[in-house]
Image: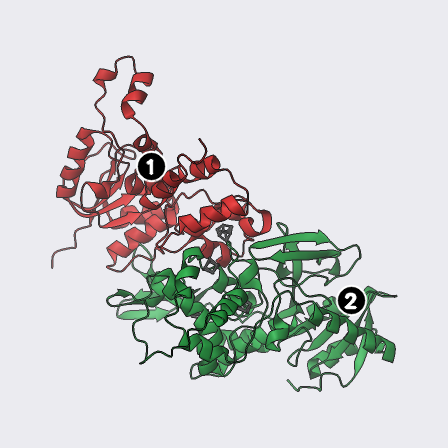
Amino acid sequence: MATKRKPRLAVWKFASCDGCQLSLLDCEDELLAVTGQVEIAYFLEASRAVLEGPYDVSLVEGSITTPGDAERIREIREASKFLVAIGACATAGGIQALRNFADVREFTAAVYAHPEYIDTLKRSSPIAEHVFVDFELRGCPINKYQLVEVISAYLHGRKPNIPTYSVCMECKLRGAPCVMVAAGIACLGPVTQAGCQALCPAYGRGCFGCYGPMETPNTAALTAWWRDQLGMAPAAIQRALRTYNAGSEAFRKESEAYEHAHD
Amino acid sequence: MTEHEPHDRLYVLDRTDLQQLFDALRTRGYTVIAPQIENNVIIYGAVDRVEELPIGWTDVQAGGSYRLARRGDDALFGYTVGPHSWKRFLSPPLRMLWRARKTADGFEFIDDGSPPPRYALVGVRACELAAIQRLDDIYTRGAVIDDDYQARRGAAFIVAVNCGQAGATCFCASLGTGPSVGPGYDLALTELMEGEHRFVVAVGSERGAEVLAELPHRAASEGEIELAEAIVAQAASQMGRTLETAGLQELLYRNVEHPYWDAVAERCLTCGNCTLVCPTCFCFTIEDTTDLTGQIAERWRRTDSCFSTAFSFISSGSIRTSAKARYRQWLTHKLAGWQDQFGNIGCVGCGRCITWCPVGIDLTAEVAALRAEDVGQPPAEPILEMA
Ligand code: SF4
Ligand code: SF4
Ligand code: SF4
Ligand code: SF4
């Protein structure tokens, strides 16, 4: 009987800060177990050794911001059996999707001496806008335990336990007092997907929305409460929605509803 | 446990001797769980000393709002209920059911063998005791018995407290679950602040009597008994909310298609906070996990909520995708379906779901709104499509 070949794993980077790839390196205890189960075929952040495709699993970090990116992600898709987009950049366009609300040419003109050399797309877009994505793992950065869970589930042919409900569920499960109810602090938890174990609320801060919109986000009702009950200014509401997941549909639409409210 | 007639004899325990109650419970092997302040909220957690209680504090509650305030005295129990409920301790939100290791010819269970914790729950309010009894019905009196719950519950010692004031989101009086503590406690306290700071104590069980026997106490006087009764009567008159229960089940069943559900769905965030703070919500999901090597498998039980789409996931997808379907599920289950299932209403009037809803959705107001516009059309046939 032939010995079972280890699945080959590749980690790819597009426009991003490397934070999600670092989550994988940060797995420490689990990393040895990961390398025991998979062959790391491409992971420049960790090793210069590069093995040719095809790959069984590709983890893709970062958003698509240049015509070159758009081409490269198609090649990666071709070479990958199972493609997982990791992090807010790869799943929603990341913080760099703020350019989607403005004219990117103005930015390049302001930043570069020779803007004509800059070949960039108008929008920063998530991987799923370009190729089929098998699984999206949210977060800015992703949670390393969730990453290990997705890899374990893949290896053993089961569904990953990655809930799509609100941060509030995790907040209540850990027994943290609600900062919105008990302190009047605006919190994106009710419209944000779980995954961080309600880290910020547990330390008395409102949720910043790192994991993007939850399964059925009612952003209009939440921001109406912020405005009417917490006395939050429209500009502040817009800013709260325009961070790492500004490009996600639910946060983008709601932030646009507050676009001219403060002019 | 043998039930005593609640008011058969009443005693008095001085405030200065209350630490001895905590000590007696700890000597008997209980972990004392009591109210305490954390991050400006009164929660439940382990305590050793009476001084760790929220002495002199009260809570000011409203739909979607909770603040602590100074009382102006040294009352130990001068507040109502916060975001935690005792179900955290009797039915923990996340619990491993089993763990197994792969072997050459199958798998073997790994037994961690730890006995269930023994908790003394101090400061259990009338509505909360009623909620624990709802959980008893569900987890220990049905076709399937939850062994872990039964073990924790059987071991638990309950020190109940009669409410001396009601909160703005309280409505236990509408449901007959409070503010006076019903049977089922081991000891029940009423805090008297007039004159000497002391507690009128009722004994509800054999083991309650045994614990009290170890503490300095005396028989309550007529005056003290009257004072204790007046305090609870005052709380009953302060209920901030009311819920009309007459015909409630029929009202909800015949208004399944009421346009009102769309209106509440516009405000509801489907965040699930209401079900998670509710002391009677009992739903959970099962999660199976494997480690990376595939050598260890675990099964976990995690609290779930009918506000998650996974809750109603069947082979073709989730059947309650809209906020309307999910809010209706919650309200109709608590107030109507529960009656068919367990013979009582699934709400004890604690007000938590009103206070801890981030956008202040208030089930008493929602029921009143439905009543005001009762369309009165019973569904023609059994409702199969719920979304
Ligand atoms: S603090 Fe935020 S995440 Fe936690 S329950 Fe409140 S609104 Fe939800
Ligand atoms: S439904 Fe609301 S008021 Fe009733 S028991 Fe649950 S949390 Fe308390
Ligand atoms: S209201 Fe929802 S979460 Fe609560 S017991 Fe009923 S179905 Fe379960
Ligand atoms: S009623 Fe309130 S607490 Fe419950 S799911 Fe809706 S918004 Fe959340």
For label 1, the residue is A94
Label 2 Cα neighbours within 10 Å, binned few <14 / some 14-19 / many ≥20: some
The C terminus of chain B: image quadrant: bottom left
The answer to whether one can see residue A230 in this image is yes
Return the x and y of residue B245 as percentages of the image width and height. 55, 77
| Chain painted red | A
For label 2, the residue is B18
**Splitting the image into 4 quarters, where does residue A123 fall?**
top left
Q: Numbered disc 2: what chain?
A: B
The N terminus of chain B: image quadrant: bottom right
- Residue type indicated by callout 2: Leu
Residue in the picture at 27% in, 67% down? B104
Residue in the picture at 16% in, 39% down? A76
- Residue type indicated by callout 1: Gly
Q: Is residue B157 left or right of residue B276?
A: right
Secondary element type, mark 2: helix
| Chain painted green | B
**Splitting the image into 4 quarters, where does residue B208 fall?**
bottom right
Residue in the picture at 27% in, 36% down? A63
Return the x and y of residue B272 as percentages of the image width and height. 45, 60
In this rendering, the answer to whether B222 lies above or below A40 is below
